[in-house]
Image: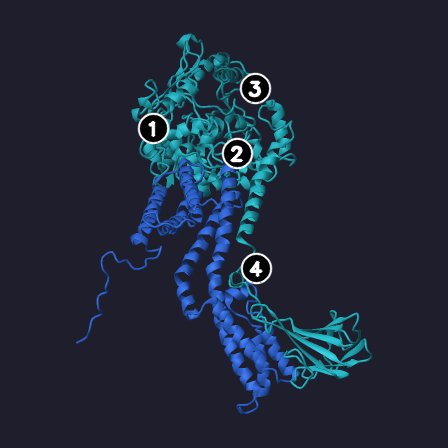
Amino acid sequence: MATRAAPTRRIKGDVRHEGFLKHAGFRWLKIATVLCLVVIASYLMIDITPRHNGGSWYGYTLGTIGVLLILWLTALGLRKRAMTTGRWSLKAWTSAHVYLGLSLIIIGTLHTGFQLGWNVHTLAWALMMLVILSGMFGVGVYAGIPAAMSDNRDEMTQVQMLDALRAIDRQLHDAAQPLPHDQASAVQASLDQDPFSGGLLRRLTGNYPNCGTARAQATLRQWTGAKPDTGDDPLERIDALLERKQATLARLRKHLRLKAMLEIWLYVHVPATFALLAALTAHIVSVFFYW
Amino acid sequence: MTFLIRQISHTADGREIVRQSTLPKPHLSIGRAAENDIHLQDLSVVPDHARIEQIDARRITVRSTGTLGFDVDGRTVTRVDIDTVEGAELRFGGHRITVSHGEADGIVLSVQRVDALSDALEEKDEARVFSLTGLLPGRRGMAWALVLSILIGFLAVPIFSYATRPAQDTRNIYAVRGERQAQMKQASLTKQDDVTGDAAWSPGPLSQTHHALEGKCESCHVKAFVSVQDSACQTCHNPAQVHEHAPAARIAMARAAPGMGGRILSSFASAFGKPGDGACVDCHTEHEGAGPMQQTAQQFCTDCHGSMNERLKDTKLGNAGDFGTSHPQFQPAVMTVAPSLGLKLPRFDRVSLDAKPVENNGLKFPHDIHLSRAGGVARMARTLKGQKPYGDALACADCHRPTADGVRFLPVDMETDCQSCHSLGFESIGGTVRTLRHGEPAQVIADLRAFYRSTGPARPIALGSTARRLPGDYAAAKVGASYLRAAAARPGNAEAAIRAVFSRGGACYDCHVIAPPGAGGKANWQITPVHQPMRYMANGWFDHAAHKIESCESCHAAPKSSKASDLLLPGISSCRDCHGGEQAKADVPSGCALCHSYHVGDGAPWVPANAIRDKTVAKVIALSGARVTGSADETLGETKRNR
């Protein structure tokens, strides 16, 4: 008789981990959706002449809602430094931050009335969209990357990864002692390689075309390639070590790439948020300065 | 001759371990190979790298055995002489050999590994190397840089520039108006003392008409944090020309009381110094794009006119909320009393077309006979086809000529439009036809009298001229006598001819209403003046040119009209065949401003090109050459467009 999957043994109240996206049964997703629908419906129903723009009473209303939301969303930066639980837990706050932040796409864009141009007003809108889009990227990587990172690490810590590399380097160094100078310097090139080298692009793509270790191995294989593996050639041992070093480097680099993805969006999200606050200030002041 | 070798190494916790050995040899070998005197486990070092030879008690020579050199005090060499008393520092790969002079003439070589085996083995700051720190500028730094540049560029610079403008800003609205207008024109040519950096504040381009003010924000936004006032508009637009269509107090009374939301809004507006209802900017919005200015919304009119009788009890105007659904029947100004004795000027009254008004314009003119495709008129038209541009029957355009702008029609002119059929000729002299003078009855009478006075009766053929008459020829004498009698009596015949011309069957009587001598205390024949108005609706605008696609008969029921007193104006239902309200699904959705001007004048109301959504109509307007779009070359102060 085919067995059915046993029902999950969860006692009432025994809640397993629930991420900020699903928090409280998508409560903030629902709230944000309702908010967006109300805004869209009122935008379509309220007849502003000659056409919708930020300067109508409806535009001012949307603008006020938008700026209050932006200020509150920015406050996550303060709030996250004080972790609490419960109804106003940091998780609830983050959930609201994500979904209300997304609703700003609708509120902010309808506030413009689709009148965009090369001015400070559109700058504020563009920065807002940049912040939201980088936030969406952030939510995406937070959802997917930790699992991939955990798989890649294979229960090693960062220091252990570095230590593994160091152990291989020491063995390489010892094994290469009897080599003639040209072969030894090929190994030395691998040893001199900084495993953390490479710019932002290398970090994000995980693509290192000029890897010293790969080149060292390629060079050594010019000598070993034509010879049979007798088992006592130090070059064969070095080749095996370089193979291991490449594998370790690959794991480290993948780790670095995933970690960079986790971090990079904040380098956009945070400075753009402050730029947005500045542009918003200029936007509001200029609108009323030249009223 | 001894070398003292001190091998220095470090434990994991950094403690130094020194192993000493003495080599009583005059020369030492250095290299990676194990058999060397100084064995350096360093892949950068050649198996047999160099020799150290003692020259005397103080001096040694170091030289490479191969081509690979070594460093001495930072310089790469292959051979060097060293005074050990002075000392030196040699560098082979990752190892350092410090040369010094020991006691008892011994030469001390301190060998120490200074570089890590590999880059990975060097000390790494975990928090730093595993993160993006160092690869990107810091978040805090970027945030500050962005915040400061935006605040300075988009806020501080314009405000500073605004605050430090030349004190005697000539473009102040409080300046003398005429002077200011001249300066405004000049300002449109020069770009000096503008506020710098405020272009980024403009939410959108100005309309064509105000294009010259682009970038001169302070022309209209005169005071910081005070919204644009009417006075700013009036520096260019003469208030004498741009005025309300009713006294301000009446307009205020007519305006519908705002609802709850409206009251909240207006209280906000007044709290923030916005001008109240009816301000220029209420209706004429700007920064809406670089086309023609935005059309005034129908709502702006219907706020008052939609239910005006509720607030203005004494108004004679009907409520008008939407052309398609709520607009009173047209009320043309009809001449109800013609000028007569004691009434020098005619009296006009506005009468609704529903009341089927008639207007006695002084003419006798049956449109039906003239437009009929059969009968005498059509026959006459066919006869004259070669000389005149007539068809097989008369058409409207054969008699009615449009004005130069095509908006309306010129009064029918007897000489041009009627005379080809209705001839006033009375005598032909050498092929030239003499005609009675139209419009001048006194001249007609005088001409007829002169005609009878200057011409004799028809000369009998039997009347001899110079031949001598034979006595007894009674017949000839009779002819002569009767001719002389007729000649003597001929001037008296003029009165009969005059009477005939002005009476039934006469040339004048056919078309005109005529008063005989004595009527109205006048001694002569009187022709009732003809009244041909060119415009019946002074408060509405109708452009015939825009309606060229329609035939005349589709609106004017002329072919069925048998009397000149029929008022052939079409009613509102005829217009509604094509025109509906602003939001209507009609062929031509029409807001109030299509026909009416808020600032009353006798010109066309201001209508931007995009107000007319019907493509055919817009095309016809374009073909007719009518100016519908705004243009920037209008003179300042002109607000109306006279088509």
Disc 1: which residue: B306
| Horizontal side of residue B221 vs A1, given as left or right | right
| Distance between mark 3 and mark 1 Cα atoms | 89 Å
Disc 2: which residue: A289
Above or below, comparing residue B345 to residue A269 in the picture: above
- Subunit under mark 2: A
Q: Quadrant of residue B617?
A: top left
Above or below, comparing residue A110 to residue A239 in the picture: above
- The single residue placed furthest to the right in the displayed view is B56
At label 4, counting other C-alpha atoms closer than 10 Å, the crowd grade (few under 14, some 14-19, many 20 or more) is few
Same chain for mark 3 and mark 1? The answer is yes
User: Which secondary structure, mark 3?
Assistant: loop
Which hue belongs to chain B?
cyan
- Subunit under mark 4: B
Which hue belongs to chain A?
blue
What residue do we see at 20% from left, 71% from top? Answer: A4
- Is label 4 or label 1 in front? 4
User: Which secondary structure, mark 1?
Assistant: loop
Q: In front here: B42 or B141?
A: B42
Cβ–Cβ under 8 Å for marks 2 and 4: no
- Subunit under mark 3: B
Disc 4: which residue: B134
| Distance between mark 4 and mark 1 Cα atoms | 69 Å
What residue do we see at 33% from left, 44% from top? Answer: A38
- Subunit under mark 1: B
Disc 3: which residue: B465
Amino acid residing under circle 4: Gly
Amino acid residing under circle 2: Phe
Of the two numbered discs 3 and 4 on the same chain, state the one appearing first in sequence: 4
Q: Quadrant of residue A9?
A: bottom left
Q: Position of residue A151 (x, y in %)?
A: 40, 69
At label 2, counting other C-alpha atoms closer than 10 Å, the crowd grade (few under 14, some 14-19, many 20 or more) is some
